[in-house]
Each structure stands twice: as structure tokens, then as C-alpha cells.
Image (cartoon, helix red, strand yellow):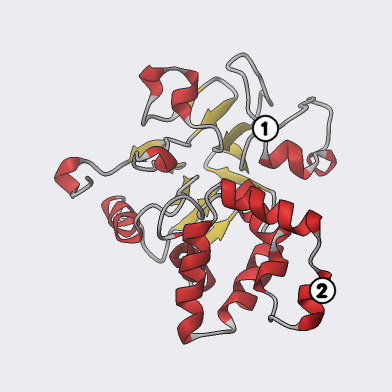
Amino acid sequence: MIYVISDIHGYPFDKFLSLLNKANFNDEDYLFILGDVIDRGPDGAKYLKWLLSTPNAQLILGNHEEMMLVCEFVFAEVTEENISSLNTENLTIFANWQINGADPTLEGIRELMKNDREIINDILDYLHDCELWELVSVGEKDFLLTHSGLGNFRKDKKLSEYSSYDLLWNRPDISDRYFDDIITIFGHTPTEYFGEEYKGKIFITDTWIDIDTGAAMGNCPTLLRLDDMKTFTLTDQDGNS
């Protein structure tokens, strides 16, 4: 079975594992996370560590992971040379990441490094290797997985021609249409932005599906199984507060 989820944003890791368990996710299945496991919530670093050791889970890069990579200088060894290389641009970039919820991620990474100082290098290497999009076929359906959809979309435009900004920062309008023969699945834009009636629910059009159900806003993220398009969330009965 193939599953997708997006924009976890540090959602409590134990609840995430409960969500996978609810869907009977196992070693024979595969999970794509469509970006933004980190920031805002408390457990982002735990997801990064989990991804390092989970071969049947793959992260598609999100804009928050991109912000972390742009601020890679933060994790460099503190030396006079590194300190002298910091400039106003670096500090502005780092401040922008902090504004977007970096502090819980930084705290989590500091905790991980107490037991393994080299883990930050493994995490950064992993993120550098993450793709911006992935094509997946399940049964007779084809899916394009990205973090934010397709900015500046044209049907004749090759996927390799889309910029990282198009794939990481795009916010679609309800009227936007993508490919007719491929279902595009993404997150980044919480579905309640399309209307209060979509709060906590995935948003489906005839050419794309937004699965960001607002974990950053306190909602449960939604797990979508591509084989039968069934969704899974935690309820109060599952222990979700």
C-alpha cells in the first residue's frame, strides 16, 4: 500500500505513530511525506531522526526544510572563522526561519545532539538528497507528489522546468487546473483556506488534491492511502486531544 501525508509540523510523534497504526501501516507499505515535518510543533526533530532509519518512508522537500537548509550555517562548529563569516544577510535569513516556527526544531536538534553530535550532519545530508517531486503509479492511476502544487503551471511545461519556488511556495486557487491524466497531490495550503467547511478535511478537485488538514493549527494531519483513496485521522476515541 502507498500512503501520503503532508505538513506534519512537529505534530506529537506518538500520535503520528498511532495514526500509522490505525491505517495498519507496516514494513510492506510505503509512505511519502510531502514536506514540512518540522517547525511550529514540538517534535519536528524526532521526524527527521525517524526518517533516517525508516527505509519505507520518503520525504519530499517542503519549504520549511528548505529554510532549514538555507540556514545550514547555524549548525556549523562555532569557530572564529565561522563567526566572522556571518553577515546581515545570514542573520536576516535565520530570523525569517525563526519567524516561521524554527525554535522548536532547533531545540529538538539540540536534544538529539546531546547523544549524537554527528546526527545533524546525517540530517542535513538527508535533506539535501530529498526530491522536490515524485511520480507514483498505483493500480491504473498516476499521481504527482509535490509540497505545494505547481506554480506557474502550463500543460506543456516539463516538471524539470519548474523552479523550487513553484514547487515549495505555491498557493493554488480553487479554479486552478493541472494535468488531466495525472492527479497532483500536495499540501502547504491548509484546506480550511478554501472554506471553513473544509477544516480538517482534504480538499479534492478533478485534477488535484490538497491534503494539508492543518496540523500547524492544532488539527490532526490526514493520511491518504492511494490504493483506495481512503483517509485516516485520529479522533477523540483514538486519544487525539
Task: Assign the C terminus to one quadrant of the image.
Answer: top left
Q: What residue type is labelled 1?
A: Asn
The residue identified by callout 2 is 84
Residue 102, position in %: x, y?
55, 55
The residue positioned 53% from the left and 72% from the top of the image is 52
Where residue 79 appears, as percent x and y from the top left, is: 74, 83
CB under 8 Å between discs 1 and 2: no
Q: Is mark 2 on a helix, strand or loop?
A: helix
Q: Distance between the residues labelled 1 and 2?
A: 35 Å
User: Residue at 60% across / 24% down in the picture?
Assistant: 207
Neighbours of disc 2 within 10 Å: few (<14), some (14-19), many (20+): few
Judging by the rendered image, the residue that carries numbered circle 1 is: 170
Q: Is mark 1 on a helix, strand or loop?
A: loop
Q: Which residue is drawn at 60% across and 39% down?
A: 143
Q: Residue furthest left?
A: 237
Q: Is residue 62 visible?
A: no
Q: Is residue 16 above or below residue 144?
A: below
Q: Can residue 234 be seen in this view?
A: yes
